[in-house]
Image (tube, helix red, strand yellow):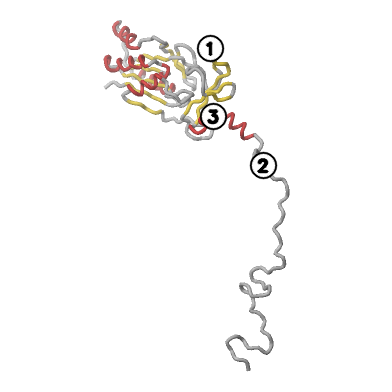
Amino acid sequence: MPELVFFSGTMDCGKSTLALQIEHNRSARGLQGMIFTRNDRAGEGRLSSRLGLVTEAIEAGEGFDFHSHLVRHLTAGGRTDYVIADEAQFLSPEQVDQLARIVDDLGIDVFAFGITTDFRTKLFPGSQRLMEQADRIEALQVEALCWCGARATHNARTVSGRMVVEGAQVVVGDMTGPASSGDVPGDVGYEVLCRRHHRRRLTAAAAGAATLSPDVLPVDAAPVPPPAGNGGRAANGGASGGATNGGAAPARTPGTAPLGRPSS
């Protein structure tokens, strides 16, 4: 049975790489696919991965109708055995419904790839609709890592090196270089973090700065005085006016008998 499958994960977990791998495997078996993308880092009409792999794709901008496009293609005698939709988080809910219709009405498998939440930890509308409509949701097995080594679960946006949690939801960029948008200043970057460090807004750069910062705890530079003396008192095992642990019994006055014995 044909399926609508949503492959999800954070940035830098290999979504586009997997999309290209699926395309390679199926085309190698003689199947013909149709690839769509939107706002790819490599430019319009291209599907690219951070490993350097790139292929041509159809740019699915606002108002693009996936179902109508496939119907026209098939009516004209074309062939399509599967559909790949990368950067699916940028799609509208209506466009996701069109992908579902391709599966149900045309009997074609659809593989969608995208991140689930934005830099504010809010669901993208396209990802939310895919989670509602997909026959199957697959979490990418290649885990992205936070700078602390924990599993990265959140996407962070930085502006001029500082993490921000406000601004336009969509600003096209990459994790290794600046990006810009009409209402966002330049020098915009992205980073994946664990939930704890996303909540604390602690990026790798901020963590490095904190490591090099001077100690903020007060330090008493005055020498610590040695412990007070025992004042001539004997320690355990010594005698000081009476018996102590392991010490001798008090001396007996001459002419007196030990306790419990009569004197002679």
Q: Which SS class for mark 3?
A: loop
Q: Is residue 246 above or below residue 73?
A: below
Point out residue 96 in the picture as x, y percentages from the top left corner: 35, 17
Which one is in front, 220 or 47?
220
> What distance separates the C-alpha of mark 1 from that of mark 2?
47 Å
User: Residue at label 2?
Assistant: 218
Which residue lies at the image location 52% right of the left edge and 26% below the top edge? 191
* Mark with earlier residue (1, 2): 1
Q: Which residue is mark 1?
A: 182
- Separation of residues labelled 2 and 3 (CA atoms): 26 Å
Image point (30%, 9%), residue name: 71
Identify the image quadrant of residue 261. bottom right
Tell me the tag on residue 201: 3
Q: Amino acid at mark 2?
A: Pro
Evaluate whether residue 129 shows in this view.
Answer: yes
Which numbered disc flags the more N-terminal residue, 1 or 3? 1
